[in-house]
């Protein structure tokens, strides 16, 4: 049997990794709307381009960073 606290810890870590991916993707989509769309500012704005790259970096590298941080150490 596994410990319920361990299961809750791993479930919460999994949720955190998925939220990092989803948050980065949402940032990219909102930045694209600012950049190309007329939703918020008519004609769009080029100032949103850096936010696209920040959102991509978050959605790709944040889950990797979290997984490495929480990796189980090897047994000697």
Image (spheres, grey):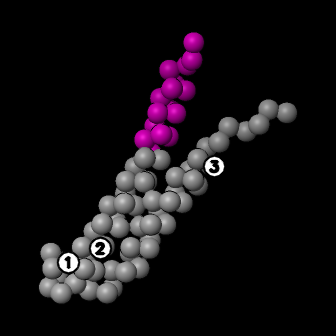
Q: Residue 1 occupies which quadrant of the picture?
A: top right
Seen at 43% across and 53% down, the residue is 20
Q: Is residue 50 left or right of residue 70?
A: left
Magenta-colored segment: predominant secondary structure: helix
Q: Residue 33 occupies which quadrant of the picture?
A: bottom left
Query: How far is mark 2 from mark 3, CA to CA?
Result: 30 Å
- Mark 2 surroundings: few (<14), some (14-19) or many (≥20) residues within 10 A: some
Q: How many marks?
A: 3
Seen at 79% across and 32% down, the residue is 75
Q: Are marks 2 and 3 in contact (CB under 8 Å)?
A: no
The C terminus - image quarter: top right
Q: Are marks 1 and 2 in contact (CB under 8 Å)?
A: yes
Q: Which residues are magenta?
A: 1-16
- Mark 3 surroundings: few (<14), some (14-19) or many (≥20) residues within 10 A: few
Residue 60 forms part of the magenta stretch: no
Where is mark 1, residue-wise? 37
Q: Residue 48 occupies which quadrant of the picture?
A: bottom left
- Mark 1 surroundings: few (<14), some (14-19) or many (≥20) residues within 10 A: some
Seen at 33% across and 85% down, the residue is 47
- Secondary structure of the residue carrying numbered label 1: loop
Seen at 31% across and 87% down, the residue is 46
Disc assigned to residue 32: 2
Measured from the top left, where is residue 55 in percent x and y? Answer: 41, 67
The answer to whether residue 8 is above or below residue 56 is above
The answer to whether residue 38 is above or below residue 15 is below
The answer to whether residue 6 is above or below residue 1 is below
Q: Is residue 18 left or right of residue 35?
A: right
Nearer the observer, disc 3 or disc 1?
A: 1
Where is mark 3, residue-wise? 68
Measured from the top left, where is residue 21 in percent x and y? Answer: 42, 54
Query: How far is mark 1 from mark 2, CA to CA?
Result: 7 Å
């Amino acid at each position: 049997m596994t410990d319920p606290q361990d299961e809750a810890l791993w479930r919460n870590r999994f949720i955190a990794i998925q939220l990092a991916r989803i948050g980065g993707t949402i940032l990219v989509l909102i930045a694209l709307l600012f950049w190309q769309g007329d939703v918020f500012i008519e004609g769009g704005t080029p100032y949103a381009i850096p936010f696209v790259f920040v959102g991509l970096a978050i959605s790709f590298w944040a889950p990797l960073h979290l997984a490495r941080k929480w990796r189980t150490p090897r047994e000697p």
